[in-house]
Image (cartoon, helix red, strand yellow):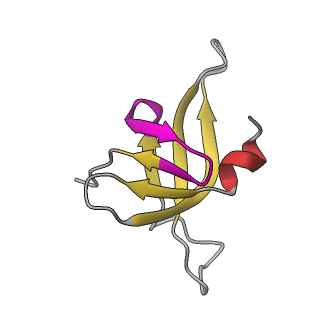
Amino acid sequence: MLLGDLQSKDVINVVDGSKLGRISNLEIDPSSGRIISITVQPNTRLANFFSSGNNAIIPWNQIVKIGGEVIIVNYSSY
């Protein structure tokens, strides 16, 4: 799977069913090459490209399933 494939999928939170947005970035461990976390940017028409305050950083182990259209995560923002 390519990064572009992941970025085209909506990220859905299994905790409350909300759509969090789409993947904007990945954090990769340089020594192992494994993905540590994903950064999800909310889907907003008027998103400010210089602001990252609303982005969610989700650890890779909180990804429940990567499907054909969506990525399901178990994410609590607190």
Q: Position of residue 37 (x, y in %)?
A: 51, 37
* Residue reaching furthest to the left: 78
49 over 70 or under it: above or below = below
**Image point (64%, 12%), residue name:** 31
Residue 21 within the segment the image draws in magenta? no
- Relative height, residue 34 to residue 67 (above, below): above
Residue 1 lies, with reference to residue 50, above or below; the image says above
* Drawn side of residue 27 relative to residue 63, left or right: right
Which residue does the image show at 26% across and 61% down from the upper left?
16
Q: Which span of residues is magenta-colored?
A: 59-71
User: Which residue ends up furthest to the front in the rendered image?
Assistant: 68
- Decide if residue 76 is on the left or right side of residue 35: left
Residue 63: image quadrant is top left
Quarter assignment of residue 32: top right
**Which residue corresponds to the image point at 48% horizontal and 61% vertical from the top-left?**
55
Residue 72 spot, x, y in % from top left: 44, 47
* x and y percentages locating residue 19 in the rendered image: 43, 66
